[in-house]
């Protein structure tokens, strides 16, 4: 399933890549980058194989229900992995420096999640930019799933069209 990409700077836009200026897409304080994703069983299995996270909450519906959830959960760190993916998509060569996370609500397999990265501050150091970012994931109904803050070192403030076309799921 392809990943949906969203972008907005000072104005909201629909799915796709767009800008409020006709020439360069510059990342500035208040700029927002978004990406929507629906996690599948295959995503959970791939994550588990890579990380060796075999928590039964992700694989056993009965275990998840006994723990008070309505179904199997998507690992929170898998959901949070959308943040560096967004940055890397718009800023190839960016270095993800730090991330804080607050897990607010569970994410269930098959739910569409929208990840958002918003520039809170940007400062230039030599030929790089240090961006402090507000990060959050929400469900389609607006419920906050994850929030936090990140810092990334960007090679430029010019946003490139997302480099996600070759990926699936």
Image: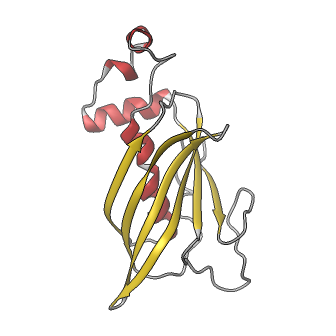
Residue 123 coordinates in the image, percent (x, y):
40, 83
Q: Is residue 88 above or below residue 23?
A: above
Q: Quadrant of the C terminus?
A: top right
Residue 135 coordinates in the image, percent (x, y):
47, 56
Q: Residue furthest left?
A: 52
Q: How many marks?
A: 0
| Along the viewing direction, whichever of 74 and 144 lies nearer the viewer | 144
4 lies left or right of 163 = right
Q: Which residue occupies 59% across, 65% down?
A: 32
Q: Residue furthest bottom?
A: 126
Residue 54 coordinates in the image, percent (x, y):
28, 24
Q: Which residue occupies 27% across, 30% down?
A: 53
Q: Is residue 129 above or below residue 11?
A: below
Q: Quadrant of residue 158?
A: bottom right
Q: Which residue occupies 42% across, 46% down?
A: 80
Q: Quadrant of the N terminus?
A: top right
Q: Is residue 151 above or below residue 123?
A: above
88 lies left or right of 126 = right
Judging from the image, the colouring scheme is secondary structure
Q: Is residue 21 above or below residue 70?
A: below
Residue 137 coordinates in the image, percent (x, y):
52, 46
Q: Quadrant of residue 46?
A: top left
């Amino acid at each position: 399933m392809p990943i949906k990409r969203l972008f907005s700077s000072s104005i909201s836009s629909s799915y796709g890549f767009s800008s409020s200026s006709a020439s360069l897409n510059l990342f500035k304080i208040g700029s927002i980058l978004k990406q929507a994703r629906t996690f599948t069983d295959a995503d959970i299995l791939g994550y588990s194989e890579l990380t060796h996270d075999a928590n039964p909450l992700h694989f056993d519906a009965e275990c998840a229900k006994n723990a008070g959830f309505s179904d199997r959960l998507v690992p929170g760190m898998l959901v949070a992995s959308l943040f560096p993916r967004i940055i890397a998509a718009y800023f190839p060569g960016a270095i993800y420096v730090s991330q804080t996370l607050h897990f607010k609500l569970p994410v269930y397999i098959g739910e569409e999640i929208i990840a958002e990265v918003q520039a809170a501050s940007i400062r230039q150091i030599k030929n790089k930019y240090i961006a402090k970012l507000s990060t959050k994931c929400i469900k389609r109904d607006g419920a906050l799933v994850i929030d936090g803050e990140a810092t990334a070192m960007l090679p430029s403030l010019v946003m490139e069209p997302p480099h996600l076309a070759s990926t699936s799921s």
